[in-house]
Image (cartoon, grey):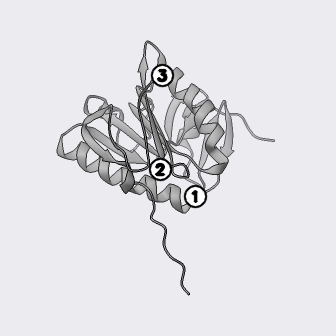
């Protein structure tokens, strides 16, 4: 049996070395990311982080708990807070407001969860942009919140080059996100 708690209680917990989230008041433990998942997150973190820093757009973060309501704390693969929202990020506390962009990189155990439950949660919490990256299918889907509803703002696969909100001036070459196949030793 799990103990129910609020988002503020969950955010006050010390890190315990596992990847857990607060889902409707209950602590859920998630599996560790796969190699392909980690590769995509790292590549996007570098690409978006450099672009955001060079242009003073805001802050790209990863592996950080984020508040999505009184009973929900999730850990998106990447989070982006625009410069005007950086005041919610302090050195001593986890943010108590949702990010402007959440990026989720799919893994086999999380496909349905990221496409439905997190999609609905981020939309309801007012996250302005949501990207879903699928390293298995080599696709990226982008959504923008319009009148409280996510509408697709971009999609690409394979080696397409995309420009997606909130980074419309950045070319994202999808081919650089996919982990190359490494030949096995004979």
Q: Report the side of 2 relative to 6 (left or right).
A: right
Question: Could you classify mark 3 by the number of other residues whose Cα lies within 10 Å: few (under 14), some (14-19), or many (20 or more)?
Answer: many
Q: CA distance from mark 3 to mark 2?
A: 24 Å
Is residue 4 or residue 80 the one in the foreground?
80
Disc assigned to residue 17? 1
**Image check: 76 left or right of 60?**
right
Report which residue position mark 3 lands on: 150
Q: Residue at x 31, y 32 (%)?
A: 166
> Which of the two discs, 2 and 1, labels the residue nearer the N terminus?
1
Seen at 48% across and 72% down, the residue is 182
Quadrant, the C terminus: bottom right
Question: Looking at the image, is mark 3 or mark 2 earlier in the sequence?
Answer: 2
Residue 146: percent from left, percent from top: 42, 16
Which residue, as the protein is rendered here, is positioned at the far top? 147
Q: Disc 3 to disc 1, how far (Cα)? A: 33 Å
- Which image quadrant is residue 162 in? top left
Tell me the mark number nearer the camera, choosing from 3 and 1.
Answer: 3
What residue is rendered at 51% in x and 28% in y? 122
Q: Measured along the vertical axis of the image, is residue 19 above or below residue 122?
A: below
Crowd class of label 2 (few under 14; some 14 to 19; many from 20; radius 10 Å): few
**What is the quadrant of residue 58 in the picture?**
top left
Q: Can residue 151 be seen in this snapshot?
A: yes
Badge 3 or badge 1: first in the primary sequence: 1
Neighbourhood count class around disc 1 (C-alpha, 10 Å): few under 14, some 14–19, many 20 upward: few
Q: Secondary structure at mark 1?
A: loop
Check residue 63 in the rendering and tell me which mark sits there, or answer none.
2
Q: Position of residue 49 (x, y in %)?
A: 29, 48
Expressed as whole percent of the image width and height from the top left, the position of residue 153 reads 40, 27
């Amino acid at each position: 049996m799990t103990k129910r708690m609020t988002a503020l209680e969950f955010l006050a917990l010390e890190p315990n070395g596992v990847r857990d989230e607060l889902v409707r008041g209950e602590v859920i433990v998630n599996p560790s990311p796969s190699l392909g998942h980690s590769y995509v997150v790292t590549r996007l973190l570098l690409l978006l982080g450099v672009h955001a820093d060079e242009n003073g757009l805001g802050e790209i973060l990863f592996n950080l708990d984020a508040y999505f309501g009184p009973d929900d704390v999730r850990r998106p693969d990447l989070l982006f807070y625009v410069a005007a929202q950086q005041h919610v990020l302090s050195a001593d506390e986890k943010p108590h407001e949702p990010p402007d962009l959440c990026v989720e990189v799919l893994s086999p155990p999380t496909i349905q969860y990221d496409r439905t439950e997190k999609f609905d949660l981020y939309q309801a919490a007012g996250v302005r942009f949501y990207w879903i990256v699928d390293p298995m299918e080599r696709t990226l889907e982008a959504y923008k919140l319009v009148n409280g509803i996510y509408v697709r703002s971009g999609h690409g696969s394979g080696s397409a080059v995309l420009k997606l909100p909130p980074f419309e001036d950045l070319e994202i070459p999808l081919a650089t996100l996919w982990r190359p196949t490494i030949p096995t030793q004979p």
